[in-house]
Amino acid sequence: MNLYRVALPALLLLSAGANAQNAVQGFVHEQSEANSYVWPADTAVLNRLDKWQDLKFGVLFHFGLYSVPGIVESWSVCSEDVDWITRKGNLPYDKYKEWYWSLKDSLNPTEFNPDQWADVMEKAGMKYMVFTTKHHDGFCNFDTRLTDFKITDGPFSSNKKANISKEVFDAFRRKNFMIGCYFSKPDWHCKWFWNPEYATPTRNINYKKNRHPEWWKNYQDFTAGQLGELLGGDYGRFDILWLDGGWIKGDDIGLDSILLAARGGLHPGLIAVDRSIRGKNENYQTPERGIPETQLNYPWESCITLSNDWGWVPDAPFKSPAKVLAMLAEITAKGGCLLLGVGPTPQGLIQPEVVERLEVVGEWLRKNGEAVYSTRTTPLYNDGSTWFTASKDGSSLYAIHIPAEEGRAPETITWSGNMPKGRMTLLDGNRKLGYKVDSNGVVSVKLPAGLPAGMPIAIKFTPER
């Protein structure tokens, strides 16, 4: 058996269409409107946000039942008729749901190694992480006491690392990562969200609250109870609470009181990400699978997959290291952070194809990271293929040029505006660069020979005042 495949029945080999090479799959959360951002009033949250904005580059792990067959995360169990929710295999919907729920008895990541995850992401230059404790399907990657639909009540339960959320968070804390807890507010497996008395036609609750207020109250208590378990201390201190499923609001689960207790206890300054819910509990915005068109001078993060999917799929096409770095440069210049989606294999490892790409990204950042980490925006942030960032004190500017991935590195790059004064250096090797400025304000920079083809080029200079 191939280490990175799972032996599956014919149904699974046909299911979900997850191998489409160019498809963008999954529900995409729209970005909240810029004018709706509400700055936190809590000084500790503001300070934590400032530290988070220094980090720039993080990883988002999706791992769960969907990892076993390698299909789009959770969504195939949702009955909405959209092109990216596919259920091949000729099973009626109810039977499909039964099959999907039964994957609980197949998820057995016998090679689960959170230290490998942390080592890979540290070498990639990542500084923060977010892990899915529970996705929309309701399967829990933590040892909740409120349901048996969890990793610790299945074939992996006897493993000493069965409580994988705790193991992952601890592994990344040992690497001094900022720690983010992903939690889905919707829970399609919970009978108080999708009640078995009715069909489940959409992602929403399948009953009327005014007719069944006790069901809705049970769901609220269940959800608040699980968040209480995660925030109660057994899983350590969190920096970010990343709440997914924007068709359910934080107000629906009493998020204000949950955050008040958390910030007043073990998690001072906890960043809340009630994603796409405009208001005081969306401490940073989360445009998904894309980058905002313009610079935004408030906290935000683009969450983008390394492959086409959030979770693991077999034979996935991956973005190149140069593409990841180009995204990171643009996002940084526009004032955001990049949260890169990686799906560990069903066995619980980061696969070699991912490791190889991220090692190249990390090597570039070790040489050029000064242009990315702890930077802030500068008013003139882009000219063609060149993106500009500024040191936090504004004393230095950085130009990150994105050449074509094919062909040789350029001999010269040019830009308009952001006039340099004095010494200019190539960050890779701290090499002095020659440049000139013409009468039209066009800066021309002469580059040394031998630069890696297709990789971004980072330059440091003092701006002319």
Image (cartoon, rainbow, N blue to C red):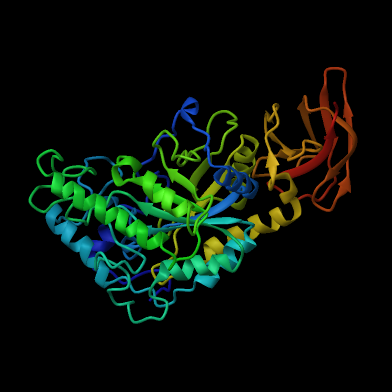
Q: 245 or 320, which lies in front? A: 245
Query: Would residue 63 be seen by someone viewing this image from the given angle?
Result: no
- Please state if 266 lies on the left or on the right of 88 as rendered: right
- Please state if 66 lies on the left or on the right of 338 as rendered: left
Give residue 284's position: percent from left, percent from top: 50, 40
Residue at 61% over, 66% down: 175
- Please state if 453 lies on the left or on the right of 279 as rendered: right
Residue at 33% over, 40% down: 251
Q: Residue furthest left?
A: 197
Q: Is residue 454 above or below residue 419?
A: below
Give residue 292's position: percent from left, percent from top: 53, 32
Give residue 298's position: percent from left, percent from top: 57, 34
Q: Quadrant of the N terminus?
A: bottom left
Q: Quadrant of the C terminus?
A: top right
The number of discs equals 0
Q: Is residue 238 above or below residue 145?
A: above
Q: Quadrant of residue 133?
A: bottom left
Query: Would residue 126 be seen by someone viewing this image from the given angle?
Result: yes
Q: Quadrant of residue 183?
A: bottom left
- Please state if 351 lies on the left or on the right of 416 as rendered: left
Give residue 194's position: percent from left, percent from top: 17, 50
Q: Is residue 308 above or below residue 463?
A: below
Q: 393 or 13, which lies in front? A: 393
Residue at 58% over, 40% down: 336
Residue at 81% over, 24% down: 442
